Image (cartoon, rainbow, N blue to C red):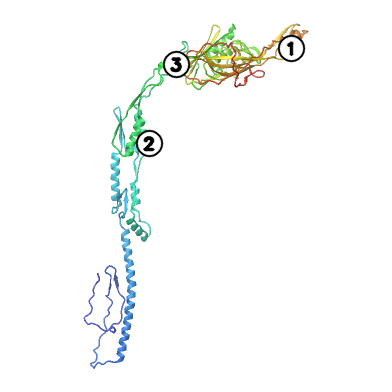
Amino acid sequence: MAKKYQKPDDRIDDFDDFEDFDDFDDFDAEDRHFSYENAYRRPRKQRPAPLRKKRRSSRSIGAKIAIAALLVLLITGGSIGGYYVYAQFAREGNLQQMTTAVEVKTFYPGVTVDGVDVSGMTYDEALAIWKAQEDEMRANFGVAITAEGQTLTVDAAMAGLDFNYADVLVDAYNVARTGSLEERYALLQQLNQEKRDYTTHIEYNLVPVQEAIVAFCEQFSVRPVDATIEDFDYDEKEFTFTRETNGHIANSVDIANEAIALLESGDYGKTLEVQFEDKPAEVTKAYLESSFGLRGKCYTDTTSDSDRNSNIKLASRAISGTVVKPGETFSFNETTGERSPDKGYREAGAINQGVLVQEPGGGVCQVSSTLFLAVARAGLEITDRHPHSWPSSYVDIGQDAAVDYPSTDFRFRNNTKEPIYIWMRYSDRRVTAEIYGLKLEDGLTIKIESVHNGYTQPKDPEIKVNNALDPGDKVTIRQEHIGESATTYRVYYKNGEQIDKELLFKSSYRAIQGIYEIGPDTDPDDAEPTKTPEPEASEEPEATEKPEKTEKPTEEPEKTERPTEEPEEEPEEEPEEEEPEEGDGPSLGEG
């Protein structure tokens, strides 16, 4: 609205009456008018015109024309200058309008959070709304788990609820609050066309929730306990077993998954009851009583040598009572230790570098050989076995197992799923080895059978003259032995019918040259030992792969039987022959 000004009473009609013409004082952009407060000057003091008759003249007319032209120029120049003044003030008015639009202390129009229009709200007002939502969710969040009168409450603290709405609201509030005035105002204009929505998030960790639920349920679960071997009476050769305990198991995982599904879907406040399932023990006492017993057995007869029999008795006692757990390896030398006089072992016949000598512990090889056959018949894995320098008299060829502490050992591994118990006794010139554990499959028996493969003649005997001897005397320093070889098999029978055969070992007993001493003036021909005729070599049977064995209990396997017939099959593969370690090596046999 323009402001009006009142002019003086004495009207001035002539332009010459002004001393000068000043610029406009001001322009009101809102009312769009100029101030003219200083546009007029006080007129000069007027003098009265002379009283004479007026007349027209050409000079006065020309002057008036000039004055009119000058007025036109002045008016035209004033209009152009006024336009530029008006444009400047209009621009300043637009800047004021932009400043007013961007300097508001609330969310701008066109901004939404989680789909809610927050324009016109202050940050604190919006924060209070989302904080109320958080408080409500924390109060309602959770499920309850009950079992046998006890309750586990899953709440927001257990899940670690975390809300990010405070940061999101800051981002939403700060939109269009950076940059130049023109950039901010342009972004506000854009918000009017394209609204901008911000989304808040709720984070939580359900792993601790699942763990807590499972742990809560498991404390009420009773796991089944299988019957086990409580003891083995070596005197009675009988097992005693614990009794099994049946259990009932909570559905821990299922209840945890159900609870998590409720929390993720927002279905809070539910109560879930733990369910239990009866679960019987897998191994019962009755099963063990029918499944455990004698698995393999062997006995051999000894000589009348009391010292040798005493050593056999000591070694048998040291072995008996040994328990070999599943996967463990038994060692004869580690179990008995050194067979020394300090332990009561006596000197008896033993083989040392192909010579029969008297050594402490002589005869214990009969214990290791008897144990070897019992273990082989029990289907256990033989890992270390060596033949003697020559075949033993108490077992078939290829079925001996020489030991000599600490270098030469007999070892086997328990390749079953249950413990193995070794029982050994010496009585009445007989040593017996029995293997107890999970019995063989029903109707299955295992026999050890050997095949003689031929002979090798020794070199001619070495004869030395010993002047300490009488003429014609002959002394044996080392007995001549013909070399022999054999192949040993583990043969499987099902209800008396052979079903498979496994190659165990090829044994080589090499020929040993005899050494003799004769007295002076003795004819060497008279001292020469007579050669043993060479028998024909027998054919080698064919070996088959070891069958897969089951852990199902079977009846007690048959006693050892010496093979009488030669198997018809040829071996598919032949292991290296076991050579006796003689010469510079340790003694072999101790018996």
Amino acid carrying mark 1 in the image: Ile
**Quarter of the image where the N terminus is located:** bottom left
Q: Quadrant of residue 523?
A: top right
- The residue drawn where x is 55% and y is 8% is 430
Sequence-wise, which precedes: disc 2 or disc 1? 2
Is residue 438 visible in the rendered structure shown here? no
Q: Most extreme residue toward the right, as rendered?
A: 521
Q: Which numbered circle lies on residue 136?
A: none
State which tag comes first along the sequence, 3 or 2. 2
241 relative to 424 in the view: left or right: left
Q: Nearer the viewer, residue 557 or 345?
A: 557
In the displayed structure, would residue 7 be above or below residue 92? below
**In the rendered structure, which amino acid carries the disc numbered 2?**
Val
3 or 1: tag closer to the N-terminus: 3
Label 1 sits on a secondary structure element that is strand
Front disc: 3 or 2: 3
Query: Which residue was labeled with disc 2?
Result: 207
Coordinates of residue 538 in the picture (x, y in percent)? 64, 14
Residue 159 in the image, given as x and y percentages of width and height? 34, 38
Whether tag 2 and tag 1 are in contact, CB under 8 A, the answer is no
